[in-house]
Image (tube, helix red, strand yellow):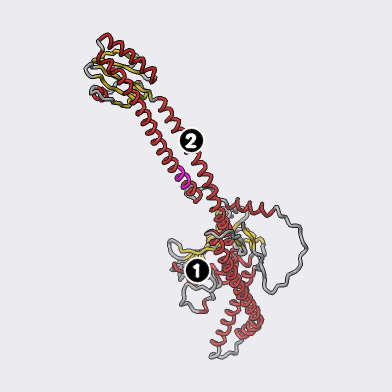
């Protein structure tokens, strides 16, 4: 949960305010709306999915291991028990009739075998078959034949020992036991059905699968709870970081517990405190610097006004000697340059203070450009590619400043080549481009050309400008809702583009 640290201004007395009824229910709803706004969709590679996958994998592996071991042990125990029981019953039944069959003649043998089969069926509930030379002598199941007995089992049974083997007969699992009577060539086989045991094992596997599914579902639920406990504080930290990044420096995170996330929250709050203090100091220093520049510019403006009037008289004086003329002209030029610098500084101060006003009026942009060039004597240096007229609503003075800086920069640094000015529209934007055919802008200067007091050519003399012209033009474009960009033309030279929004795409006349 985010909490706001109330801002405090040192030295400002607290003024009592009229108490207002607090809207307590609105705060949780507002926080919930903010959480919903910053909630991100579920990602397959996110931390929540990785936690859920880990819990599910652990549950699946554990269930598979437990189920597999239980199934194997249960099957082994069940089969061992039925094997031992069946072998004991078979061996006891065969021994019971072995002496009787050994001393009996042919008729008595047949009767004894039928009695044996009947007694064994009643005793064990199994299917018994007695053979002599592969001829069926007695049986309790007519569907069983000699061929259903595995050959390996027949070979062992003929030796007179009790042998057994599990096999399928007509798709049904059986435990087949066999033995023989010495001297009579009589083979006895007992078919014990394993279908009930197989059904029990199938039910065990089915129940184990259900138990595994339940275990995985429980593990996923626990994973969701665990991920919520981990991700909720992280989400709060993310929301707080975004609020802090958007400029709300009083954002803090509520610290809960003493775990690692709580340590991160404390670190975030400490960092936010340090950042807020640093930003406050920087803003204070920046405000002081802006006030200083504005105050100095304002204080210099009054004496410069008087100095400019004197230099105008000095420039018009005709009785200045030849030796004093260069000095007088230098004073005139430097005074005018200082006056322009003060005006530029005052304009920059207005931009910084947010007091720059835009006085919109409907003007003909083409006529405005012609007037700008005529007033500065640049008409012969600039080639125009413009329509006959283009009405637009702008601040005439500020657009004149932008055009003057764009064209003046091209004339200064474009060499002897021509300077071209284009005016047109593109969609909802009005485009004004100025291109020169000079060496272009150095690559390391492209990102700095609109910075204040920046000069791409460090060797240029101080009389060539203060480095504020393009910066002021850039700010003037922004107060109109447009932008000013600079780049190098692919065919050589620099090109500056002014984009201004217009209410509707205007056609060129």
Where residue 392 appears, x then y in whole percent? Answer: 63, 59
The quarter of the rendered structure image containing the C terminus is bottom right
Check if residue 327 falls in the magenta segment.
no
Disc 2: which residue = 210
Q: Secondary structure at mark 1?
A: helix
Furthest-left residue in this view: 183
Residue 212 in view of the camera: yes
Q: Residues within 10 Å of mark 2 (few under 14, many from 20)?
A: few
Query: Residue at the spot x=49%, y=51% of the render?
Result: 47
**Who's the residue at 51% across and 69% down the image?**
449
Q: Closest to the observer: 70 or 187?
A: 187
With 192 as the anchor, is 503 left or right in this view? right
User: Which residue position holds label 1?
Assistant: 448
Asked whether the beta carbons under mark 2 and mark 1 sit within 8 Å of each other, the answer is no
Does residue 372 appear in the picture of this structure? Answer: no
**Which x, y percent locates residue 53?**
47, 46
Image quarter for residue 406? bottom right
Mark 2 secondary-structure assignment? helix
Could you give the CA–CA distance between mark 2 and mark 1, rounded to whole angstroms?
69 Å
Main secondary structure of the magenta stretch: helix
């Amino acid at each position: 949960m985010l909490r706001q640290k109330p801002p405090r201004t040192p030295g400002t007395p607290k003024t009592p305010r009229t108490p207002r009824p607090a809207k307590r229910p609105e705060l949780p709803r507002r926080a919930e709306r903010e959480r919903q706004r910053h909630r991100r969709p579920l990602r397959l590679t996110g931390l929540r999915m990785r936690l859920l996958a880990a819990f599910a994998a652990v549950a699946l592996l554990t269930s598979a291991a437990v189920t597999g071991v239980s199934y194997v042990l249960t099957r082994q125990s069940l089969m061992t028990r039925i094997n031992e029981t069946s072998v004991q019953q078979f061996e006891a039944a065969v021994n019971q009739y072995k002496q009787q069959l050994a001393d009996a003649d042919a008729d008595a043998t047949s009767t004894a075998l039928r009695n044996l089969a009947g007694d064994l069926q009643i005793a064990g509930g199994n299917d018994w078959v007695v053979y002599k030379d592969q001829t069926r002598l007695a049986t309790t199941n007519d569907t069983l034949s000699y061929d259903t007995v595995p050959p390996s089992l027949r070979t062992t049974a003929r030796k007179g020992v009790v042998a057994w083997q599990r096999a399928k007969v007509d798709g049904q699992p059986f435990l087949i036991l066999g033995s023989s009577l010495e001297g009579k060539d009589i083979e006895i086989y007992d078919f014990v059905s394993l279908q009930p045991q197989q059904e029990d094992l199938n039910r065990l596997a089915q129940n184990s699968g259900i138990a595994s599914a339940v275990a995985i579902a429980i593990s996923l639920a626990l994973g969701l709870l665990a991920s919520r406990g981990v991700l909720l504080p992280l989400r709060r930290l993310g929301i707080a970081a975004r609020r802090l990044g958007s400029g709300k420096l009083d954002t803090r995170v509520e610290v809960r517990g003493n775990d690692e996330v709580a340590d991160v929250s404390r670190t975030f709050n400490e960092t936010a405190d340090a950042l807020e203090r640093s930003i406050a100091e920087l803003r204070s220093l920046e405000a002081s610097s802006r006030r200083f520049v504005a105050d100095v510019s304002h204080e210099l403006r009054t004496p410069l006004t008087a100095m400019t009037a004197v230099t105008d008289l000095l420039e018009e004086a005709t009785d200045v000697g030849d030796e004093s003329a260069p000095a007088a002209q230098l004073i005139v030029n430097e005074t005018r340059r200082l006056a322009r610098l003060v005006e530029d500084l005052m304009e920059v101060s207005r931009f910084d203070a947010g007091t720059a006003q835009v006085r919109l009026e409907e003007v003909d942009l083409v006529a405005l450009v012609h007037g700008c060039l005529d007033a500065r004597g640049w008409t012969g240096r600039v080639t125009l590619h413009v329509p006959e007229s283009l009405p637009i609503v702008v601040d005439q003075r500020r657009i004149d400043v932008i055009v003057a800086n764009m064209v003046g920069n091209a004339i200064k640094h474009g060499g002897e080549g021509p300077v071209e000015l284009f005016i047109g529209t593109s969609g909802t934007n009005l485009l004004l481009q100025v291109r020169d055919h000079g060496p272009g802008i150095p690559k390391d200067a492209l990102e700095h050309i609109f910075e204040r007091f920046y000069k791409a050519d460090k060797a240029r003399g101080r009389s060539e400008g203060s480095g504020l012209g393009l910066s002021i033009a850039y700010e003037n474009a922004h107060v109109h809702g447009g932008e000013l960009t600079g780049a190098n033309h692919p065919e050589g030279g620099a090109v500056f583009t002014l984009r201004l929004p217009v209410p509707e795409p205007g056609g060129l006349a």
